[in-house]
Image (spheres, grey):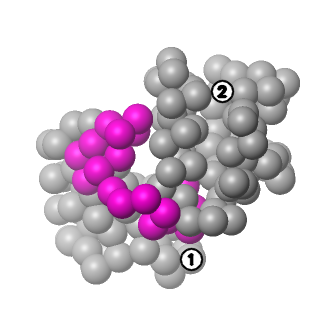
Amino acid sequence: GLGGPARVLVAEFLCRVVGIDLTGDFCQVAQLLSHYGGFSGATDFLQGNALHLPVKTGIFDTIWLQHVALNIPDKKALFSECHRVLKPGGMLSFSDHHMKRDEILAKIPHNGLFKFVKKGKKTYSFIKEG
């Protein structure tokens, strides 16, 4: 996307956010909007595939997938990649309006990668295990 949620997170929580998108043009526009909004020191946008993220192992405290998981058929590969890039004890939070609660709880904590910790109004949160 164009990085709007990333800028909201920075404004609300004074954190650093890295956004990933398949489309390079979206990443460029997101960088530009962050620059003009005064967020360029706190946001980065990388072109990449969620199944093969262009980052090192174990670098993120939190991963937030907003309307991403529903577009990726291979959920096992997606959540395995999330596990790879999260720090030990890191949190994975996401929304997926196409999966029912039972399906989410059955598929996400596969192979001991994640432990379910909380359901929000529209999100599910898991802690990295293993």
Classify mark 1: helix, strand or loop: helix
Residue 26 spot, x, y in % from top left? 22, 44
Give the amino acid type for the residue marked by disc 2 in the picture. Answer: His
**Residue 87 horizontal side relative to residue 6, left or right:** right
- Height in image: 26 above or below 17? above
- Is residue 54 shown in magenta? yes
| Quadrant holding the C terminus | bottom right
Classify mark 2: helix, strand or loop: loop
- Height in image: 60 above or below 111? below
Give the distance between the C-alpha atoms of the residues marked 1 and 2, in whole angstroms. 25 Å
Q: Which image quarter: residue 89?
A: bottom right
Residue 125 spot, x, y in % from top left? 73, 50
Residue 129 spot, x, y in % from top left? 72, 54
* Residue 13 badge: 1
> What residue is drawn where x is 65% and y is 20%?
98
Mark yes or no: residue 8 visible: no
- Height in image: 61 above or below 15? above
**Residue 47 horizontal side relative to residue 97, left or right:** left
> What residue is drawn where x is 29% and y is 50%?
54
Give the amino acid type for the residue marked by disc 1 in the picture. Answer: Phe
Q: Residues within 10 Å of mark 1 (few under 14, many from 20)?
A: few
Q: Main secondary structure of the magenta part?
A: loop
Q: Earlier in the sequence, mark 1 or mark 2?
A: 1
Mark yes or no: residue 53 visible: yes
Residue 85 spot, x, y in % from top left? 47, 55
Q: Which residue is mark 2?
A: 97
